[in-house]
Every structure is written in C-alpha cells, then in structure tokens.
Image (spheres, rainbow, N blue to C red):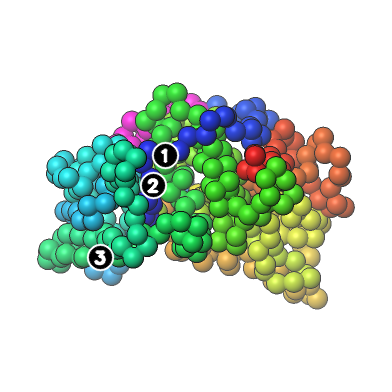
Amino acid sequence: MVLVVEPSPPMQPTSPPGLPPRARHRCLLRLQIHSVGVAEMKVAVERTGGIVVLAESFGHSVFKESLQRIFQSSDNDLGLSFNGIFEINCSKDVKIQGIIGPCTSLEKKSPLSSDTVVGQGSTSAWKMCGLDRKTSICLVFDIARKDGPDAISQSTSNQFYFQFLTYYQHHEGQMRLRATTLSRRWVAGSGGVQDLIDGFDQEAAAAVMARLVSFKMEAEADFDPIRWLDRALISMCSKFGDYQKETPSSFSLSPRLSIFPQFMFNLRRSQFVQVFNNSPDETAYFRMMLNRENVANAVVMIQPSLISYSFQSGPEPVLLDVTAIAADRILLLDSYFTIVIFHGITIAQWRKAGYQDQQGHEAFAQLLKAPHEETDSIIKERFPVPRLVVCDQYGSQARFLLAKLNPSVTYNSDNPPPPGGDVIFTDDVSFEVFMDHLQRLAVQ
C-alpha cells in the first residue's frame, strides 16, 4: 500500500523551472490502424477491479499465456476476492483527498474528507469489486490546519493515526475483515527535517508521482506534466538538499533521497508522460497497470532494470545508459511490459556462426542461455505476461533497448562511444545535463 501525506495548499514556485525539456520529435513513428476501445473502457475496468490484457491479436503469446496464467494462479480458485469495501478512519488533523487505484467511491460523507479531491474523493469508503494479493491503491491526504496566523504548530510529541478497514468476500464464500492501524508523530523545526529524510521511501515516492501525474494528465486539459514534475523536484531538492547558496557544485542529497532525481528523469521519459508514440489504448493500458501494481513493479515501469552478461563476470546490474552496450556483452532489459535480450555485435556474430553448438564452446553456450533462464523466471511471476524481444546490436528491434537508455552518447556528442559501443540518435538531454540544471536551480 502506498501512502503519501501532502500539506495543503501545495507550495507553488514563483518562477518557472528551467530543467531541459524532453524533445518532441522521434526517429520512429508507428501508424495505429486498429483501436479496440481500451481507452473508452478504462473507467469501467478500473472501478470494478477488472483485468485487461492488451496484445496484437488473440493468437499472440502475450494474450494466450496471460489467459492461461489466470486459471493457473491457484489450485482451487482464481486467487481473487470479491465484493470488497475499503474504509479509512484517521485523526482529525488529517483529511482524505482521495484514492488513485482500482476502486470507486461509495459517497460516504465524512468530516474526514478534504475539500481538495484527487482521484476518487469526497468519501471515506470505496467499493473494490475485485481484488487480489497484489492489488495496490494510492491514498492522498491533506494536513488539516487552522486558518489564520495563529495556527497552532504541531508538537513533536503529538501522535496521529490511520486505520484501514478492508472487507471482502473470500473465494470460499466467507466475509472477512482486515484492519490495519498505523501511528505516527508530528515533527517540526530543523530537527524534523532529518526525521522526514530518514523516513523517506524513494521508490514509493516515485510510484506516487507517476500515479499523480498520470491522473492529472487525464483530468486537467491544460496540464503540463513536465513542468509539474520539474517544479516538484526542484522544490524538494531546495528544501532537503545540502548546499551553499548560489553554488551548484556544493549541492548534494542524502542517500535516502539521492536516487529520486533519477526516478524523475526516467518518469519524464516514460510511456506515462510521453504519449506521442503510443495509441490512446496503449496509454490507457499502461496507466491502468500502473494504478493497480505494487511499488516494486511500478518502479520497473518507471525505471527499467538492466543486467549485463559477459565472460569477464557473472550477471550484474549496470546503469541504464548507452555506455552499457558492448560488442562482447549481452544485456537483459526489464521494462515490465517488455523484456529485451540484446546481443552485442560480436556475440551476435558468434551465435550466427553456431559456435554455441561446437565442442569446446560450452562457456559461450551457457552465456547465451543465462539471460533466457532469467527471463523465464520473470515471466513466470508476472501478469500480464510481458512481451519478449530478442535482438542484436544495430538490428531494427534494438530500438526497444535504445529508447530506454540514458542518451549520454548521441550523434552530436563531443565524446565518441567506446570501441564496440553504440550511439543514440536523439536530441534528448542526458541525465548528466538534467542534473546540472537541477543543481543550478535548486541552490538559487
């Protein structure tokens, strides 16, 4: 369960941020001919806790294997519960803005409801028609304060609580209730900042930001997602960063916060924000999956994982960067919806020559086999089943990998790629340029 507490009203920067924009043009365009209506059915599916699998055809492996997975999820049932009701009780100092996730409002009026609504709001109870062990919802709260300059500050000794009540019908027909109660304390002053940093969950924060920006893109006609994300990131770095005024080189973040800018950089480039090259059905599908999956899966959607296989070392995680490409290396990219096995040019030439079938090349055969074994284990645990792409360096399908990598080396870069490396033909800014701009704006 993802929980975020925001002050109300949110602080707005007085001047627009100057982080580099995302380039709007692409080298590759896809013509979408067929529309199956997923975008139009999104509201009905989400509010009833339904399941959607988007594939090219009913005969595609993604659809067939996902359909089989539903009936293999448990021995005696489908692993689903039904007729659920989710209810929140909390301290009077906290107000409920709403929920983003697979549920619908029961319109239960309550003094706990905030005047500001995000997602399914203006209630303290929601219907969850279908749910399972992996169902995840995002709760958004306000901090209620008294009006006027005489507002009483919260003492560090004061406690506040949240209680979540989940009623549901088990597959055996029993009605069950699960109660979860959390207690936290208010923090204030300079000492409270460190407490907030120590309790910050970067991955959960990235998942929340992805759901919020996706919701705002659908709900607000003139919403600028890049500008909103940049302002939020600059504000956070200015408040919690360690720096000397007007000295960008002095800027640093606590280890509890240091990966968050990288998450935001990849979220700006993700399919949730950059909808230019996706059909409305694909965009709706991606966001539906984001809104129901847990934090670990959401982070993979935002920032894919990249694993390297080579003769020099065993499988090891590498940076999501174009410099990870090498002629004698195999890369395994997991972006949740797609898994890519990418062979460097030398590996691809050896494979085409059939060295893996010759005596004395058992190590090469095992190197080729290792990423497929890891892929099988990922696919076995994931629903819907991801699409598998096996490609070679400089091949047409290599675009599935290149589109997700940080473009630190492009066609107009001053530094050439290493021998056997690759370049990305794009005008998008790299993560290094992004961080330079962020540091400069955060210390102003």
Identify the secondary structure beneath mark 2.
strand
Q: In the rendered image, which residue does mark 3 sit on?
A: 180
Q: CA distance from mark 3 to mark 1?
A: 28 Å
Mark 1: amino acid: Pro
Mark 3: amino acid: Thr
Q: Are marks 3 and 2 in contact (CB under 8 Å)?
A: no
Image height check: is 282 above or below 203? above
The crowd level at tag 2 (other Cα within 10 Å; few <14, some 14-19, many 20+) is few
The N terminus lies in which quarter of the figure?
A: bottom left
Q: What's the magenta region?
A: 32-43
Residue 39 magenta-drawn? yes
Q: Nearer the viewer, mark 3 or mark 1?
A: 1
Q: CA distance from mark 3 to mark 2?
A: 21 Å
Query: Which mark is on residue 10?
Result: 1
Which of the 4 quarters of the picture holds residue 106?
A: top left
Across and down, in percent, residue 230 comes to 56, 38
Camera sees residue 158: yes
Across and down, in percent, residue 98 comes to 29, 44
Across and down, in percent, residue 124 comes to 20, 48
Q: Are marks 2 and 1 in contact (CB under 8 Å)?
A: yes
Q: Nearer the viewer, residue 92 or 429?
A: 92
Q: Residue at x 74, y 55 (%)?
A: 324
Query: Which mark is on residue 6?
Result: 2
The crowd level at tag 1 (other Cα within 10 Å; few <14, some 14-19, many 20+) is few
Mark 2: amino acid: Glu
